[in-house]
């Protein structure tokens, strides 16, 4: 993502969208009642043909689809010869747009998007004649077994198939060029046997897990599989924070979660506040109080297992400076 022009005092930015990860970030930035300006197609008043024009809408709805971000709202500014009413922008990579109404949190997300290191990693979790494939990007996790017929999920019912690993290798080779790295994971020796079949092992890694499937993928990430590929990753970092929290909770460490955290913030007891994006936006006083008392704020997104676990705690957790009495 590129910030082509900006005025933080006015909450304005002109944004260059570069890839699908940018769309993920923008889906968390854009919301009512921001105003978005973009070139689009709109029906003219006289006739049914459409013309290319620049419109401004006031956002009412955002929807992140497979390869685009759809923004819907009422037209508040546009050419005189076009129909007014509601309009939808389809935002895709290699486009520019302008936005008004950005908050401090929005700027944090935009800065993060601009400086983030994009990556695209293929995970293959293999055991007992089964192979599950997942795409892991900065913007989240995608189960390829349900969306790409060239990379099926549980490929073989016959666990004794002598060609199983060779066929899995062939599947990986067909799509390998589309990824920065491939990680072979699983609980047994099959991942190592699969690794040995490759002549080119550049950016090819293995990772032990106790299970396969999505649970195995999350375990691989927790064990640092992404660190083998990129120096920093959002999912890896956020998973590490939540692992540390649950480890402390098991040993009655100085942590808390849910509604009690709000009172602990008032007491100045919170060293690090961990919240979902929704809580971050809705509980602005809580976020400000944490900062005023010297606490750090960590946002954990809900598009992976660690974030889902935080959501189950009410979206709020905290590392404390001391155990409350």
Image (cartoon, helix red, strand yellow):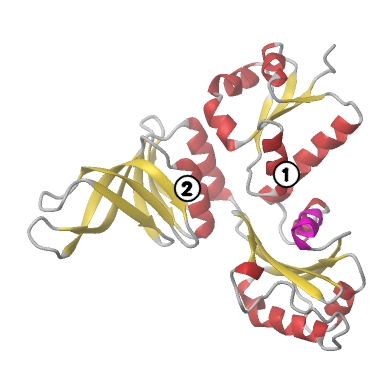
Q: Categorize mark 2 by other alpha carbons within 10 Å: few (<14), some (14-19), many (20+).
A: many
How many callouts does the rendering have? 2
In the foreground, 163 or 193: 163
Q: Which mark is residue 269?
A: none
Seen in the picture, residue 78 relative to 40 is either above or below; the reply is: above
Q: Choose top left, top right, bottom left or bottom right for residue 30.
A: top left
Q: Residue 97, image x and y in percent? A: 35, 51
Quadrant including the C terminus: top right
Tell me if residue 289 comes above or below residue 42 in the rendering: above
Instruction: Single out the residue that lies furthest toward the left.
Output: 46
Residue 207's image quarter? Answer: bottom right
Q: Is residue 16 above or below residue 308?
A: below
Dot 2 lies on which element?
A: helix
Which region of the structure is painted magenta?
213-220
For label 1, the residue is: 306
Where is mark 2, residue-wise?
Answer: 26
- The quarter of the displayed image where residue 302 is located: top right
* CB within 8 Å, label 1 to label 2: no
The percent position of residue 225, horizontal first and vertical second, equals 79, 58
Q: At numbered mark 1, what does the secondary structure look like: helix, strand or loop?
A: helix
Examine the structure image and report whether residue 34 is included in the region drawn in magenta: no
Q: Earlier in the sequence, mark 1 or mark 2?
A: 2
Residue 144 location (% of width, % of height): 64, 68
Q: CA distance from mark 1 to mark 2?
A: 22 Å
| Dot in front, 1 or 2 | 1
Main secondary structure along the magenta-highlighted residues: helix
Farthest residue to the front: give it: 157
């Amino acid at each position: 993502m590129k910030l082509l022009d900006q005025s933080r005092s006015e909450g304005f930015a002109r944004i260059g969208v570069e890839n699908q990860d940018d769309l993920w970030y923008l889906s968390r930035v854009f919301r009512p009642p921001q105003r978005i300006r973009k070139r689009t197609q709109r029906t003219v008043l006289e006739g049914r043909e459409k013309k290319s024009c620049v419109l401004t809408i006031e956002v009412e709805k955002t929807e992140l689809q497979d390869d685009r971000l759809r923004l819907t709202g009422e037209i508040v500014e546009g050419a005189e010869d076009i129909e007014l009413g509601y309009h939808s922008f389809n935002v895709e990579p290699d486009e520019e747009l302008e936005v008004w109404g950005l908050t401090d949190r929005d700027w944090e997300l935009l800065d993060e998007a601009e400086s983030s290191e994009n990556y695209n990693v293929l995970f293959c979790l293999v055991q007992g004649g089964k192979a599950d494939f997942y795409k892991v990007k900065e913007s989240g996790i995608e189960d390829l077994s349900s969306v790409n017929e060239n990379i099926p999920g549980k490929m073989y019912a016959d666990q004794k198939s002598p060609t199983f690993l060779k066929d899995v290798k062939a599947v990986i080779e067909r799509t390998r060029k589309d990824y920065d790295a491939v990680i072979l994971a699983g609980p047994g020796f099959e991942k190592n046997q699969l690794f040995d079949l490759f002549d080119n092992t550049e950016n090819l890694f293995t990772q032990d897990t106790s299970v396969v499937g999505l649970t195995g993928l999350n375990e691989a990430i927790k064990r640092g599989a992404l660190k083998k590929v990129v120096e920093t990753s959002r999912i890896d970092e956020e998973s590490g924070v939540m692992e540390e929290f649950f480890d402390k909770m098991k040993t009655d460490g100085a942590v808390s979660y849910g509604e009690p955290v709000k009172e602990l913030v008032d007491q100045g007891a919170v060293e690090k506040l961990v919240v979902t994006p929704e809580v971050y936006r809705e509980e602005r006083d809580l976020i400000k109080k944490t900062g005023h008392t010297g606490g750090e704020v960590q946002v954990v997104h809900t598009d992976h297992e660690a974030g889902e676990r935080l959501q189950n705690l009410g979206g709020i957790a905290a590392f404390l400076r001391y155990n409350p009495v």
